Image: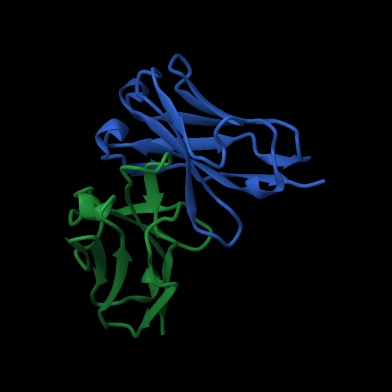
Chain colours: A green, B blue
Amino acid sequence: QSGLAQPPSVSGAPGQRVTISCTGSSSDIGAGYNVYWYQQLPGAAPKLLIYNNNNRPSGVPDRFSGSKSGASASLAITGLQAEDEADYYCQSYHSSFNSHVIFGGGTKLTVL
Amino acid sequence: QVHLVESGGGVVQPGRSLRLSCAASGFNFRTHGFHWVRQAPGKGLEWVAVIWHDGSQNYYGDSVKGRFTISRDDSKNTLYLVLDSLRVEDTAVYYCARDLGSYDLGTSYFDYWGQGTLVTVSS
């Protein structure tokens, strides 16, 4: 069983916009299951960033946004700040795997 | 304020057992399902197990099925994970996480996480 595919790393300068992709299949994202995004700062637990594809929990800046199309999803971060340097994970649900909850491999965001 | 606090991690030899706990506070524990998610050193997140809000059902990831057992004690607002027949590859930080969705509807996601507890399996 494999999870969702994410690029291992992305980078951007302060103030720039970056996107992180999350590619699934017809049995998970493409089957209509929602996508969730988590931010994990160094040494910390993951934190919910986006739920139900494009919704932000209270307290998450509007610089973070999510989108979904077909079997893929994306997280966009605008106005990059040094504090955004972290690992980002997407998560969804797979209809066939025994481990229905699936994560992407994670993307390390470096703010240059 | 929602708090989840894991405990029980440590160094254990292969083949031995360990029990992790996750103490919850600040919300109605009985109305939520919970999950355990682990993260091996330097690696990504791996889903481990889920238990229903009423404890009636639980499911496990393939890598731990038959060896780990998830349970809950609503009188103590505590979630547990018993790890049996531990292997070196079970070495990871184990997080408990509150489910704001529904596993059986395919909408599970995690709005609160504990700080994690490290399990090291080594001879």
- For residue A9, what is the image quadrant? bottom left
Question: Measured along the vertical axis of the image, is residue B105 above or below residue A61?
Answer: above
> Which residue is found at the position 23% from the left and 60% from the top?
A71
Question: Measured along the vertical axis of the image, is residue B87 above or below residue A23?
Answer: above
| Quadrant where the image shows the N terminus of chain B | top left
Question: Measured along the vertical axis of the image, is residue B79 above or below residue A51?
Answer: above
> Which residue is found at the position 43% from the left and 36% from the top?
B35
Give B16 or A18, whichever is nearer the viewer: B16
- For residue B56, what is the image quadrant? top left
Which residue is the extreme one toward the right? B123
> Which residue is found at the position 51% from the left and 40% from the top?
B62
- Residue A40, position as x, y percentages in the image: 43, 59
Residue A57 visible in image: no
> Which residue is found at the position 39% from the left and 49% from the top?
A102
- Residue B109, position as x, y percentages in the image: 32, 43
On screen, residue A56 versus residue B5, left or right, reads left
- Residue A57, position as x, y percentages in the image: 23, 50
On screen, residue A101 versus residue A45, left or right, reads left
Residue B58 visible in image: yes
- For residue A73, what is the image quadrant? bottom left
Question: Measured along the vertical axis of the image, is residue A52 above or below residue B73?
Answer: below
Give B41 or A77, whichever is nearer the viewer: B41
On screen, residue B14 versus residue A3, left or right, reads right
- Residue B111, position as x, y percentages in the image: 32, 43
